[in-house]
Amino acid sequence: MDPNAWKAKALNLRADLARVLRDKGTADRVLTQLRDRAPSGRAAAWDAVAAPVFEQAIKRRPGRARAVRLVMGRLWDVFNSGAAAEAPGRMQEVMGQ
């Protein structure tokens, strides 16, 4: 599988990501930073970029935590496709909240 194939698939999640984050700009920033940092390590990129954004989204709107976690899980699956299937520590923490 092409290691960059996740980028095209992630664009399909952009609308869902913007919906749960309630901010299209933040959704675009997360996707861009994940793309830029992926070559240096997917787990590290996820912990630095996506995990804090999702944690804040859950704290701001606890009633939407399930929706946020669903989109976060889908984005991780896409982002991690073709790479080692290991969830970074911060993702496990957020998913367990």
Image: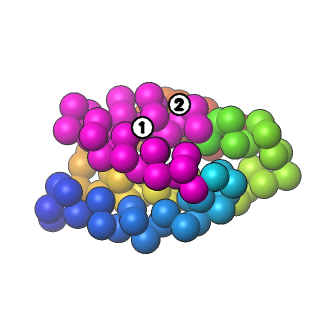
Q: Which residue is mark 2?
A: 90
Determine whether, in the image, residue 41 is placed left or right of residue 46: left
In the image, residue 56 above or below residue 71? above
In this rendered view, identify the residue nearer to me: 31 or 77.
31
In the image, residue 69 above or below residue 9? above
Res 71 seen here = no
For badge 1, the amino acid type reads Trp
Residue 72 position within the rendered picture, expressed as x and y whole percent measured from the top left: 55, 52
Q: Examine the residues drawn in magenta and state their main secondary structure.
A: helix
Q: Mark 1 Cα within 10 Å, few/some/many (few <14, many 20+)?
A: many
Give the residue displayed 73% in from the left and 42% down from the top. Answer: 58
Residue 78 position within the rendered picture, expressed as x and y whole percent measured from the top left: 37, 60
Q: Mark 2 Cα within 10 Å, few/some/many (few <14, many 20+)?
A: some
Query: In the picture, which quadrant includes the C terminus?
Result: top right
Res 38 seen here = yes
Quarter holding residue 60: top right
In this rendered view, identify the residue nearer to me: 33 or 45.
33
Determine whether, in the image, residue 6 is placed left or right of residue 49: left
Q: CA distance from mark 2 to mark 1?
A: 8 Å
In this rendered view, identify the residue nearer to me: 22 or 53.
22
Q: Is label 2 in contact with label 1 (beta carbons under 8 Å)?
A: yes
In the image, residue 83 above or below residue 10? above
Q: Which residues are magenta?
A: 24-53
For badge 2, the amino acid type reads Arg
